[in-house]
Each structure stands twice: as C-alpha cells, then as structure tokens.
Image (cartoon, grey):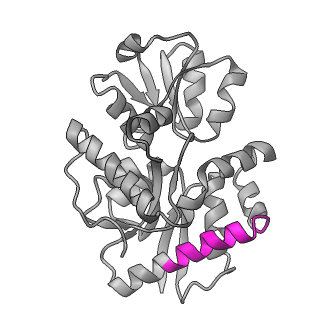
C-alpha cells in the first residue's frame, strides 16, 4: 500500500520519521511517498486533502478535523518550548496591541497562541519563519513571533524577548503546549488508521532507542545548522509526548481548542479527533 507522507526538514521531524522512511522498522506493508516542506506548505496540502499522512500545526488542524484524525505518536508538545515574541527594543505589555507583528504563518500554532493571549491584536503580516528576525532588525516590523531554531539565535542578533507565549500558556492552563501533530486522512478504514498509528509509534520509539541512526538524514536537511543547535532543537521538541500523547497530551490539545473556541478564534471542534 502506498501513502503520501509529509513532514518538514526540521530536525525534530527528520529525527522521528527516519526509521519509517528508511525501512528500519516494520511498516506493515505500507510504502511512503515523501513530501518534505515547511509546515505552512504542509498545512495547505492538508487543507486541499492532497496528502494521506502529514505533520500539521495544531492551529491548522482546527480547520480540517472533519477530514483528518490525530495520531497518538509524533506530536510536538512540551513545556518551555513555545513561540517567543521578540523585538529590537523593550516593549511593555500594554504596547503589544499596537505593534506591527511578523508571524510565521496564519495557521501556525504560534499565531493561535498570540490570538489567545492578545485577541484584540490585528496588525500582523506573514513571513517565512527564517526571515522574521531580519524584518524586525530592519525596522520593517516592530516585533516578530519566532519558532524553531530561531529560539536559539535571536539574542546573538541583539533582539530581546517581549513575551514567551509558551510560559503564558503554561501559566494559564498548567498544561503542555500543543505545537504540531501528525494526522492521517479519515477516508481510510479503521484498520489502516490503526496501522499507521502503530508504525508512527514504532518509528518514534526506534529514534529514542537508536538516537545516532538518524543523524545522516537529520544533518542532510539541516546543513545550515551546527550540531549543537540541531541537537538542542531535537531535545526541545521531541519528548515523552512524542512517543504517546497519553491522557495529559490529549487533554492539552483539547484545552487549546476549548480556549480558542471560547474566544471565537477557531470554529467549534468535533469531539472525535484522535485515532482510537
């Protein structure tokens, strides 16, 4: 059976998917056709229903829940790993609503968290995540919402943290931050959905048990990143929730949607969103 599989070139994704795309584990007869791109592009493929299994931001999932289910393994949740709002200058909390903010995509979970924290803020512009520091430094935008490896580099460029939206979320809910998950198209029979879920879990477990095996694949797609940043990236986003969402992970995801629905920033969610 052939299924299309989408994930990003970020180290946390290549790390957990390496085993299933390179035949290191039993894929139960599934062969994968890879689509590697940034998460916003993957989100667009999912919106169009053009992909079978894909990494997706939890914000974007709110708009395709009728077509996809969330796998129990592969998610990026955690503590102290949320998006940061940064600027060249010190910014006081009451000034945030008036800033021109660069965001890494309308449907990123970073933008959803910004919407939850500052629902009155409207002045945003989308940029490729890797360009956000530069547009803030140039003065084109007042502030930027950074994700991925930029968390490790912004201070070196003289930029300052305005607010850590992960800390905001943790303080508000006491729960992990749901950033991205892996979803599978609902069109397949239940036995196929469960098979995909098992294969994903097997791939993540292999990565934990054999952390060096994926290094060539991870490094190939992170050539501009030094090994220390690459490993820091993996450590930040790959954890026990990646192995299995479990009760607490599922509750964190459901709470994200409950908070966002209450504020009217996403549509009302259906209840059956996980592969069972």
* Magenta stretch in the rendered image: 198-213
- Helix, strand or loop: magenta stretch: helix
Residue at the outermost front position: 174
- Residue 268 can be seen, yes or no: yes
Asked whether 67 falls inside the magenta stretch, the response is: no
Left or right: 123, with 163 as reference point: left
Residue at (33% x, 26% y) in the render: 118
Residue at (19% x, 51% y) in the render: 268
User: Residue 246 lies in what quarter of the image?
Assistant: bottom left
- Residue 226 can be seen, yes or no: no
Query: Does 191 sit above or below residue 122?
Result: below
Query: Which sits in the foreground, 267 or 79?
Result: 79
In the image, residue 40 lies at what x, y percent?
45, 47
In the image, residue 140 lies at what x, y percent?
50, 16
Residue at the outermost bottom position: 29
In the image, residue 66 lies at what x, y percent?
24, 64
Left or right: 188, with 159 as reference point: left
Residue at (63% x, 55% y) in the render: 12
Q: Which quadrant is home to the C terminus?
A: bottom left
Query: Does 244 sit above or below residue 123?
Result: below
Query: Which sits in the foreground, 56 or 90?
Result: 90
Asked whether 200 falls inside the magenta stretch, the response is: yes
In the image, residue 271 lies at what x, y percent?
24, 63
Residue at (44% x, 55% y) in the render: 56
């Amino acid at each position: 059976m052939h299924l299309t599989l989408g994930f990003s070139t970020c180290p946390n994704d290549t790390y957990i998917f390496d085993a299933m795309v390179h035949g290191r584990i039993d894929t139960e007869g599934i062969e994968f056709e890879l689509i590697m791109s940034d998460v916003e592009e993957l989100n667009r493929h999912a919106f169009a229903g053009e992909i079978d299994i894909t990494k997706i931001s939890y914000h974007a999932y709110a708009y395709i829940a009728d077509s996809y289910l969330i796998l129990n393994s592969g998610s990026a949740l955690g503590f102290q790993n949320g998006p940061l709002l940064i600027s060249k200058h010190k910014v006081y909390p009451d000034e945030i609503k008036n800033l021109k903010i660069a965001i890494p995509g309308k449907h990123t979970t970073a933008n959803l968290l910004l919407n939850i924290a500052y629902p009155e803020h409207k002045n945003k512009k989308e940029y490729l995540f890797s360009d956000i520091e530069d547009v803030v430094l140039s003065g084109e935008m007042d502030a930027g919402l950074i994700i991925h490896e930029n968390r490790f580099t912004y201070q070196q460029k003289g930029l300052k943290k305005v607010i850590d939206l992960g800390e905001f979320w943790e303080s508000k809910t006491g729960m992990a931050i749901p950033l991205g998950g892996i979803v599978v198209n609902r069109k397949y029979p239940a036995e196929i959905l469960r098979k995909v879920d098992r294969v994903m879990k097997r791939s993540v477990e292999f990565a934990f048990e054999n952390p060096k095996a994926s290094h060539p694949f991870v490094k190939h797609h992170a050539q501009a990143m030094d090994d220390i940043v690459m490993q820091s990236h993996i450590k930040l986003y790959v954890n026990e929730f990646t192995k299995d969402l479990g009760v607490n992970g599922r509750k964190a995801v459901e709470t994200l949607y409950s908070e966002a629905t209450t504020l009217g920033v996403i549509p009302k969610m259906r209840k059956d969103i996980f592969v069972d």
